[in-house]
Image (cartoon, grey):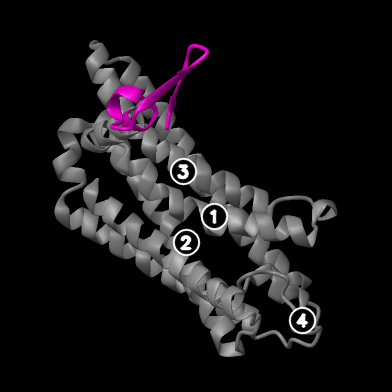
Amino acid sequence: MFFFLFNLALTDLGCICTTVPKAMHNSLWDNRNISYAGCAAQVFFFLFFILADYFILTIMCYDRYVSICKPLHYGTLLGSRACAHMAATAWASAFLNALLHTANTFSLPLCQGNDLGQFFCQVPQIFKLSCSNSYTRELGFLIGSVFLLFGFFVFTVFSYVQIFRAVLRIPSEQGQHKAFSTCLPHLAVVSLVISTSFFTYLKPLSVSFPSLDLSLSVLYSVIPPALNPLIYSLRSQELKDALRKKVTEQWSPEGSDCPLLTVNGFQFIS
């Protein structure tokens, strides 16, 4: 699990570093320009890391399925060599898909201006700048994205149905709690990634507005990678205890060294 978490952390870091630094630079220096090669590189790396994120999450779902539903076969099915092979396959598949989509996108002639209307280069926005008939390519990109998300969604749902059935057969309440605590962070991350992606790419064209498109782009490109470390780190009991202690000290008068004033029965920290 920690090996796959390491790979997931790399994809999250890659997604953030591909979009946020350039957007921050443009905001600080009031410069909204990006070179053609820089835009192509941003598209490639973002697709590469976001697709790798999907593949790694799918592998982690399989990891949870084997560990709970087939624990005696875990060492055989998910040994160190098998994990390395699956991770390498995920990264290689993401690289090839990103390269294909990037080459397909930037082979189009662009003559409808140079205003993307987003804070980073995005494939649907680039299609809008093409002066050729790009509907076939756009449809192919959309169908490919839908099939990828749908396959990811179906595999996840099927795996978690089997996982929950196995967990409910565990006789001890402590065992059920341990199994659920292992699965819930992954399920939360998967739900966040799937929901934001569906809202971004499968929303009706009639509700496409620049401000809404910009908000959805931030929602699926920045929020999930930023929240994934927090979601998984909360599985650490030490971190939860430290956070609980900090909150208690912040809001409890007994944990403060400041003098207290009593006004109409209420205590205020001065």
Q: Distance between the residues labelled 4 and 1?
A: 25 Å
Residue 141 position in % (x across, y down): 64, 66
Label 4 packing within 10 angstroms: few (<14), some (14-19), many (20+): some
Amino acid tagged 4 = Ser
Residue 138 position in % (x across, y down): 71, 68
Start-end of magenta stretch: 249-270
Find disc 2 in the rendering and name its residue: 51
Left or right of 71: which side holds 259? right
Q: Which mark is residue 190?
A: 3
Label 3 packing within 10 angstroms: few (<14), some (14-19), many (20+): many
At x 36%, y 49%, the residue is: 229
* Helix, strand or loop under label 3: helix
Amino acid tagged 3 = Val
* Helix, strand or loop under label 1: helix
- The mark closer to the camera, 3 or 1, is 3
First in residue order: circle 2 vs circle 3: 2
**Residue found at the very far right of the displayed protein:** 206
Evaluate if marks 2 and 1 touch, with contact meaning CB atoms under 8 Å apart: yes
* Helix, strand or loop under label 2: helix
Q: Residue 148 carries which label?
A: 1
Amino acid tagged 1 = Leu
Q: 127 or 229, which lies in front?
A: 229
First in residue order: circle 4 vs circle 1: 4
First in residue order: circle 3 vs circle 4: 4
Amino acid tagged 2 = Leu
